[in-house]
């Protein structure tokens, strides 16, 4: 997530940090409930209420022990350490808060039986991820467009900064469309409540950790969406933000302690430079600015040295898996977090859910700069991050340079080749997520100069290279615009709102060019879904020649040959150079057109085209 400027919101926050708010006697307990039989018996509850720290705490339930009660700087908070034995039965008990001369406060705490439905399945190279910005995809329930009492109640589809009304029901209503396209996993930009006064639509400034934004629906509707995905054999990727919260987050409105977030004498922004994190010659202040500086005025930077902060975030993420059945996580602004905490977090997730996968956003330049964040300590950083994979920006920069005209064809395809040749620095590069665009980047159709041939060239690469492919909503119909500002690449998907004059969810509503893109992508995605060779097959690539890049995906049963011509003229490719992989095959079948090519003959590769062949005897 890239920063924006909201000075007023910051000033309102900054000058009220030391104050403690007036709150109800027992305002909340989080997490509001938990489960029996969890791998980790430890549970820390955060309790918020008016001078709640003046009260003693007790509970009685077989197998549940109140180990310790922690008080912090703000008397409106308590942190309760509970041990939940493996033998504890599901049920409820009373948390009792007592004070001499005052009536006891009580909270009924429930321990539920564990969710035995599908969950934490992990997202792998067998999947195709589709990224949706919920506010801009489809409005399935106009009744929640404006919620009284929230700070931003303006609804204006003509503004890129106001909310447009997209919601979870709108996504549920179009799951058939996604499934038909070949999507197997859905990644939503954050859907936790963002009760911010400005630009609350993007979701990256959460004001709650356990509550879906009411303008999207409810916790129950989110769970229903995940259930609907699972019924279709699809998965849910939840977008997590460890690094920061919104300035109006409930804990910011009544800070537990000054060290809940990173404090500076004056507002101090991150330097947004990842190099000091691994630079052997780095200055300490540069590293501190990177990790402790605020992302933006309205995004307070969490102090992950604080153990209560760590527990609060980690437990909320486990809660969403167990409650809703989430299958994987995308970790926003990964490099800005405390590395020790992120390692601890990853190990806790894997201990509880061994099949769970997650990938970190690494908006950097340079393969080593990206790979250093991944697990295995392959680049001698000094510790294992336990992060399986990252968003592969290096592949994106390479394919972008090929299609945007900044480099000649030979240099462009060679950059792509070189990027993959450096995969030895990863423990397993197939866990990286490859993509052409997202909510922070220019639409790739615009990057390609709205040239359909270049666009299809890149789509074919995306769905045949190694890793986990990810599409951004509307990529299948060539939605366009450059990210200047970001709102231009976050437009509504036409047809998702009642009364839209056209409906791009249907073939009848799309232009001939849009249908050509849609059909091309669907064919590629369908083939990939049905042929494991493009999911888990090995990769062999050849040094590019004359602006032509050739690589193979192969396993014990299938071989696919991919030929990318980056030139604006057709190229004639002699096949003899590739006998190491073509030996034993006599023909190649184009998976898009069905046309056959005799492998012994010269292959004519049209200009700006990626051919994808299935090799046959």
Image (tube, helix red, strand yellow):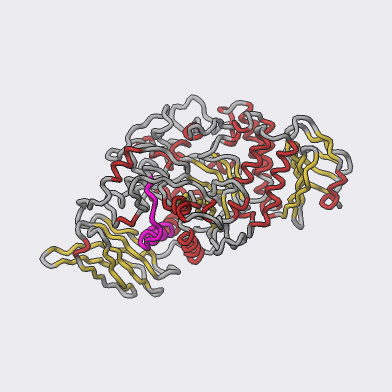
Picture coordinates of residue 614, whole percent (x, y): 77, 46
Q: Look at the image and tell me whether residue 193 can be seen.
A: no
* Left or right: where 74 falls relative to 140: left
Instruction: Report if residue 152 lies within the magenta region.
Output: no
Magenta-highlighted stretch: main secondary structure?
helix
Q: Give the residue at x 66% y 37%.
A: 401
The stretch drawn in magenta includes residue 310: yes
Residue numbers of the magenta segment: 299-318
230 left or right, relative to 563: left
Residue at the outermost top position:
501
Residue 8 screen position, x and y as percent: 32, 37
Residue at image point 28% right, 60% down: 47
Judging depth in this view, the residue of 19 and 145 nearest the camera is: 19
Q: Quadrant of residue 42?
A: bottom left
Q: Quick one: 590 or 362, which is closer to the camera?
A: 362
Q: How many marks?
A: 0
Which of the two residues, 527 or 475, is positioned nearer the viewer here?
475
In this picture, residue 43 sits left or right of residue 400: left
Residue 85 versus residue 543 in the image, above or below: below
Q: Is residue 385 left or right of residue 584?
A: left
Question: Where in the figure is residue 280, as x and y percent of width and height?
Answer: 56, 58
Q: Quadrant of residue 281?
A: bottom right
Residue 40 image position (x, y, % from top left): 43, 69
Is residue 269 among the parts visible in the rendering? Answer: yes
């Amino acid at each position: 997530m890239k920063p924006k400027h909201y000075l007023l919101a910051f000033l309102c926050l900054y000058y009220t940090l030391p104050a403690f708010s007036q709150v109800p006697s027992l305002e909340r307990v989080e997490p509001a409930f938990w489960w029996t039989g969890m791998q980790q018996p430890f549970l820390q509850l955060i309790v918020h209420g008016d001078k709640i720290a003046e009260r003693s705490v007790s509970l009685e339930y077989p197998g549940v022990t109140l180990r310790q009660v922690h008080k912090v700087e703000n008397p409106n908070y308590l942190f309760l350490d509970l041990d939940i034995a493996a033998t504890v039965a599901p049920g409820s008990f009373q948390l009792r808060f007592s004070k001499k001369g005052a009536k006891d406060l009580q909270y009924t705490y429930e321990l539920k039986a564990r969710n035995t439905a599908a969950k934490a399945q992990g997202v792998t190279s067998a999947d195709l991820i589709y990224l949706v910005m919920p506010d801009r995809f489809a409005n399935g329930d106009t009744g929640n467009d404006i919620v009284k009492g929230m700070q931003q109640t303006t609804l204006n589809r003509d503004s890129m900064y106001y909310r447009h009304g997209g919601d979870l029901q709108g996504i549920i209503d179009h799951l058939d469309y996604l499934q038909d396209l070949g999507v197997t996993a859905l990644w939503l930009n954050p859907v936790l409540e963002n009760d911010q006064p400005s630009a609350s639509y993007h979701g990256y400034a959460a004001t709650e950790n356990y509550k879906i934004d009411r303008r999207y629906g409810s916790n129950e509707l989110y769970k229903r969406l995940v259930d609907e995905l699972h019924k279709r054999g699809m998965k849910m990727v939840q977008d997590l933000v460890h690094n920061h919260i919104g300035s109006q987050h409930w804990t910011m409105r009544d800070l537990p302690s000054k060290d809940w977030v990173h404090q500076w004498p004056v507002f101090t922004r991150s330097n947004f430079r990842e190099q000091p994190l691994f630079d052997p010659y780095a200055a300490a202040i540069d590293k501190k600015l990177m990790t402790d500086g605020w992302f933006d005025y309205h995004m307070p930077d969490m102090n992950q040295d604080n153990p209560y902060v760590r527990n609060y975030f980690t437990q909320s993420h486990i809660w969403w898996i167990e409650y809703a059945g989430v299958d994987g996580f995308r970790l926003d602004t990964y490099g800005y977090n405390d590395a020790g905490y992120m390692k601890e977090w990853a190990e806790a997730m894997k201990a509880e859910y061994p099949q769970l996968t997650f990938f970190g956003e690494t908006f950097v330049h340079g393969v080593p700069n990206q790979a250093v964040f991944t697990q295995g300590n392959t680049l001698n950083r000094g510790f294992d991050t336990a992060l399986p994979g990252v968003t592969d920006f290096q592949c994106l920069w390479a394919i972008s340079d090929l299609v945007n005209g900044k480099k000649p064809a030979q240099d462009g395809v060679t950059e792509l080749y070189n990027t993959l040749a450096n995969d030895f620095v990863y423990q397993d590069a197939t866990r990286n997520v490859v993509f052409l665009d997202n909510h922070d980047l220019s639409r790739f159709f615009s990057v390609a100069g709205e040239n359909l041939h270049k666009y299809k060239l890149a789509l074919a690469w995306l769905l045949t290279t190694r890793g986990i492919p990810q599409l951004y909503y509307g990529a299948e119909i060539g939605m366009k615009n450059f990210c200047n500002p970001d709102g231009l690449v976050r437009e509504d998907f036409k047809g998702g709102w009642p009364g839209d004059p056209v409906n791009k969810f249907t073939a009848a509503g799309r232009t001939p060019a849009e249908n050509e893109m849609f059909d091309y992508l669907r064919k590629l995605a369908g083939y990939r879904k049905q042929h494991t060779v493009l999911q888990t097959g090995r990769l062999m690539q050849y040094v590019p020649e004359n602006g032509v890049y050739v690589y193979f995906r192969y396993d014990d049963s299938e071989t696919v040959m991919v030929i990318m011509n980056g030139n604006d003229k057709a190229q004639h490719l002699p096949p003899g150079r590739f006998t190491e992989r073509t030996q034993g095959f006599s023909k190649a079948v184009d998976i898009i057109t069905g046309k056959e090519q005799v492998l012994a003959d010269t292959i004519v590769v049209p200009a700006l085209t990626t051919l994808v062949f299935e090799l046959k005897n």
